Amino acid sequence: MLTLYDNADSGNAYKVRLILALLDIPYKRVEVDSVHGETRTPAFLRRNPNGKVPAVELADGTHLWESNALLWYFAEGTAFLPDSRMEHAELLQWMFFEQYSHETKVGVLRAWARHGPITDEQRRQIPTLEKEGYRALGVMEAHLDQRDFFVAGVPTIADLALYAYTHVSHQGGFDLSDYPAIRGWLDRIAALPGYVAITDA
Ligand SMILES: N[C@@H](CCC(=O)N[C@@H](CS)C(=O)NCC(=O)O)C(=O)O
């Protein structure tokens, strides 16, 4: 049986819960307190040497980590991972965008809002992260203005990667009122058969 080392509040971990639910893959869930250091214990570092959730242990005892790599692993052979060379490159394009330009702003401000207190240095970074977060949301809005989904016209792991922190971006202070294409896309993801909410963990 597959085991997911998870955290109920983590958007990165939620990506994995979401793909497993959409694909109806059974798994055992282990909650890890990633806010209070449980990811840095020797036992957990043997599962993910980088000390972060999500991580999975496959049935043969192999471990895998990094949320977007896990999305790719579970989606292989399904409609969530279209198979042309160009589509693979486009998936990676949006998933790298998510990790570098989006999660590090939109996700980080949410984490600070929910798990404070924050340091003075972090407080000084907030306006810059807000500006860069809205810039990333603007890139998404422009792309979705003429499309239902990010790649190939169908829901893929690029959508799931970007959905995780976008749909709870208000918890980090972001206002999506001026982003109608994103709001429509969020509704389309939430309507997928098998969808689970981040709060369902
Ligand atoms: N790039 C990683 C980021 C994972 C990550 O930042 N996990 C956070 C929770 S959202 C964590 O476990 N933090 C605990 C720590 O760094 O000790 C991924 O996408 O899986």
Image (cartoon, rainbow, N blue to C red):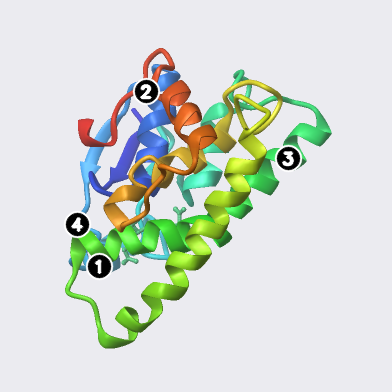
Dots 2, 1 in contact, CB < 8 A: no
Disc with the residue nearer the chain's start (1 vs 3): 1
Dots 2, 3 in contact, CB < 8 A: no
**Residue 149 percent coordinates (x, y):** 60, 28
Q: Residue 126: which quarter of the image?
A: bottom left
Residue 25 visible, this orientation: no
Q: Residues within 10 Å of mark 4 (few under 14, many from 20)?
A: some
Residue at numbered disc 1: 41
**Which residue in the rendered view is the most extreme toward the right?**
85
Write the residue at 64% across / 45% down.
94
**Residue 20 percent coordinates (x, y):** 40, 27
Give the structural element (helix, strand or loop) at label 3: helix
Whether residue 161 is situated above or below residue 37 in the rendered picture = above
**Which residue in the rendered view is the most extreme toward the bottom?**
120
Q: CA distance from mark 4 to mark 3?
A: 34 Å
Q: Nearer the viewer, mark 4 or mark 1?
A: 4
**Residue 76 percent coordinates (x, y):** 61, 27
Dots 1, 3 in contact, CB < 8 A: no
Give the structural element (helix, strand or loop) at label 4: loop
Tell me the tag on residue 90.
3
**Which residue in the rendered view is the most extreme toward the front?**
178
